[in-house]
Amino acid sequence: DGHEVGVFDHNFERGPETSQHYVMFFLPHTMYAIQNGGSNIGVDQDDGLPEFLITGCRDGERGDRKLGGGGSTQVYWKATFRANNPGTALDFVVKVLNAAVIGCPYSWPANEGCTGGVWTELPISKFQLHFVNSPQYQAREDTIKNFTDRVLSRRDLKAGLLDPYMYNSLILSVKSLDPYIERLRAHGYDFLLADVSRGQHALIVCIPDNDITFQLRSAHINSDTRATTLSNTCPQRFSDY
């Protein structure tokens, strides 16, 4: 169909694996891609797809051997974010989402010229959140930081504003928003609470020093925080999916 597809290879500097092989599908007119990995990704060397070798000081001994090696049986088991500051992302998801730190083949802070990152896992679902910074692939120096600063310059959750970049968010369904609101307040994180549709509420949060947005959605909320109905916006009706 003319869409961009590429085969990516990660080489490990050490560890039980020598490389990791997967296919990346790039979504047109977005900054998103879908990664298809595993033991049988259905791509032949004769398919003529472009191949890319990823070098980033990747240590196979430090990774999560269960899922990081492509052994997951779940269809969708992780989300990877380009992070300006993986460290603050780690602090946020641990404090607010009760995520656990898991093995990661990258270190943070990163060594000069290397990819840096942190990997975490949500409780119960075991869904993974990966936050990665790869400055060596920037078209220009400080591209990641400059883009993040530009996005955050428009962000004002306290004023109840939803900027266009916040539509690039990961939406998670939770039983109740109350415990998350309590944690956000306890740690001094800003948030935006919105009515979306059919009794659904969205708790919109942004990770400090990153242009990463999460939406937690639930029909249950007992908080005394006033739910603000956003005007002139088009929020997804998550309850329909």
Image (spheres, rainbow, N blue to C red):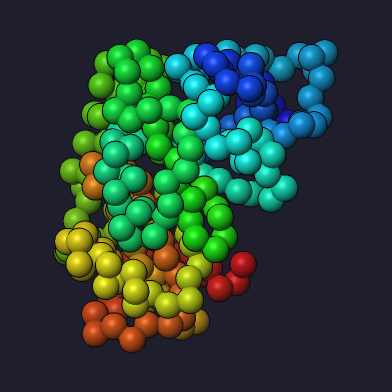
14 with respect to 202 (left or right): right
Q: In this view of the protein, can residue 185 be seen by the observer?
A: yes
Q: Position of residue 229 (x, y in %)?
A: 32, 75
Residue 90: percent from left, percent from top: 34, 45
Q: Position of residue 73 (x, y in %)?
A: 72, 47
Query: As rendered, which of 227 and 54 lies closer to the eye?
Result: 54
Q: Quadrant of residue 228?
A: bottom left
- On the rendered structure, is 225 left or right of 80? left
Residue 60 in which image quadrant: top right
Q: Residue at x 68, y 44 (%)?
A: 72
At 19% from the left edge and 56% from the top edge, which residue is drawn? Answer: 156
Q: Nearer the viewer, residue 107 or 36?
A: 107
Q: Considering only vertical position in the picture, is 195 above or below 115?
A: below
Q: Is residue 117 left or right of residue 228?
A: right
Query: At x 63% / y 33%, what residue is drawn?
Result: 69
Percent coordinates x, y for residue 115 in the rendering: 40, 22
State how many labels appear: 0
Rendered view: 205 above or below 91: below
Q: Nearer the viewer, residue 65 or 158?
A: 65
Q: Which corner quadrant holds the C terminus?
A: bottom right
Q: Is residue 10 visible in the rendered structure shown here? A: no
